[in-house]
Image (tube, rainbow, N blue to C red):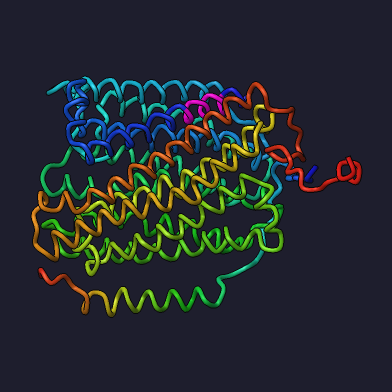
Amino acid sequence: MDKKAIKLWFYSSLFWLALGPLIGLLQSFQFLWPEWMNIFSSMALPYSKMRIMHTNLAILGWLVMMFISAVFYIVPRLCKVELQYKSLAYWAGWVWNLALVLNVILIWAGIVGNPLLSIQPMEYAEAPMLSDILIVLSAVMVIASVHPTVVRRTQKRLYVSVWYLLGGLYTTSITYLVGNFLVLGFTGLGNQVIEAWWLHNAVGFIITPLGLGVAYYLIPLAAQRPLYSHSLSILGFWTLMAFYPGTGLHHFLQMPMPAWINEFAVISSVLLAIPVLAVVVNFLATPRGNWRRAVESFPLRFAILGAVYYLLTCIQGPFQATTAVNWFIHFTEWVQAHAHLALTGAFTCFGMAAAFYMFPRVVGRQLYSRQLASWCFWLMAVIFPIYYLGFTHAGLVTAISINLLGNTIYETLSAVWLSRLFRTITGGGVVLAFVLFAYLILRSIKVGKPFDEGMNETPEVPNTITMEEATA
Amino acid sequence: MNQNKDSMDEIHEGRGGFPWWIWLVAAIWVIYAFFIGPFDLNSPLN
């Protein structure tokens, strides 16, 4: 049963979702009350280690595991063939989890000087080599299951989701190999160029194709409408593949890089507007004429919310990648706010949409509470943007203080305290959304009503009162 | 009960294109990014 693999990747991702953002919340306390640093440091968990755990678990634990779970669900259905080599898909989940557990333990242990077990000093690629090897092994196992599924399909025409999901698995492997292994063969500037390539493609070539592939599947089905445009979907896929690889160096515009590399990165970033517009127009135009489904269907609601956040983050991204803007906001929390808009906003919403869609169909039970699902949605739709604005505000204040007024970072700390407090409080609301989301799903395993195809994923809204009820 | 029939795997695809205002937005963006931004709004530190 392919359900075994889907469930393993699915439930694992919920665990990492509960843990990764919680670590981020604990990090934010340290900005407000620095003595918290001493508390965590006394447990061998200084801020630097917590930061690594936070990003690694949010990306590789929550997002990638949920999307790979969706790959196992979606690809066989679109190819009209069973998932091939299911045991590989299943055991790959355990290998991936083992890699993440080792990642956490080894980062915590902080072993020095061991090529296999030490933290590596590269952003997003800090995982010790042992963990890297297991991740690549697991990715190869996943591809060994999904690729033959696509090859042996009975549906001749490939829907765009299959392009994105299979392509995303390959780009995940290539990106991971380059960013974690090839990079070790270079020193100095070459090392940093590859590091920058990896840094941005961890989002653009791992999270993005997988997340968009999932959304391309969910939106037409949940909206019960045809996809708006086949040609835009193909245009979006190939322009993403063409323009994304060049963008990474926009992270290092302030560094002594050859100018042509920086210019190439900025131009690539600006050109990303093409795939982004193609994707977002397709997502937002598909439910036309049937928008009432956004009220009934939580998968559609979350996917559309994700599409809106995706549009916002992708407008912001090319904009801030230009030198005209980058000098101002670089080295401030503006950049982290942007990363959260992409990963916590857009792609987490796609992941939640996938979870809401898949759970009833895989487990055979409805999500037990429409109210709880609504809470998750509104926390993500209202509290998350406020959290993002608090984050951005802290970045802007820092930028003004340091880049315009010439203050030191120490003089700036008191100026951003309130916006950081605001960020922590609203960030707590976002973490609450994740905890409620995980609880909703886990509780539904026991108390959810039996689900049949054709039912809603959540219980119906009692929106009509019968004559008997009115007169009772 | 809402009829959420999705027939599992059949997704139909339309033949839509970019709406007209996307072309307008794209043109403004390209003009800004390539012709205005790099020349007019550089860092005062440069």
Residue A399 visible? yes
Instruction: Residue A162: give x, y in percent of width and height.
Output: 56, 45
Front residue of this view, candidates A290 and A204: A290
Which quarter of the figure is the C terminus of chain A placed in?
A: top right
| Residue A129 quadrant | top left
Q: Is residue A291 left or right of residue A65?
A: right
The answer to whether residue A167 is seen in the rendering is: no
Q: Nearer the viewer, residue A327 or A117?
A: A327
Please report the residue visible at 46 percent of the width from the left and 36 percent of the height from the top.
A432
Instruction: Identify the residue at horizontal 36%, vertical 55% (top origin).
Output: A389
Count of numbered marks: 0
Asked whether, in this view, residue A95 is left or right of residue A43, the answer is right
Is residue A443 inside the magenta stretch?
no
Residue at 10% of width from left, 49% of height from top?
Answer: A410
**Which one is nearer the viewer's eye here, A311 or A199?**
A311
Looking at the picture, tell me which residue is in the foreground, A36 or A306.
Answer: A36
User: Please, is residue A232 above or below residue A409 in the view?
Assistant: below
Looking at the picture, how far across and down is residue A227, in whole percent?
64, 57
Q: Quadrant of the N terminus of chain A?
A: top right
Whether the magenta-drawn stretch holds residue A13 is answered as yes
The quadrant in which residue A123 appears is top left
Q: Which residues are magenta?
A: A5-14
Give left or right: position of A431 versus A465.
Answer: left
Farthest residue in the front direction?
A472
In the rendered view, would you say A271 is above or below A352? below
The secondary structure that dominates the magenta segment is helix
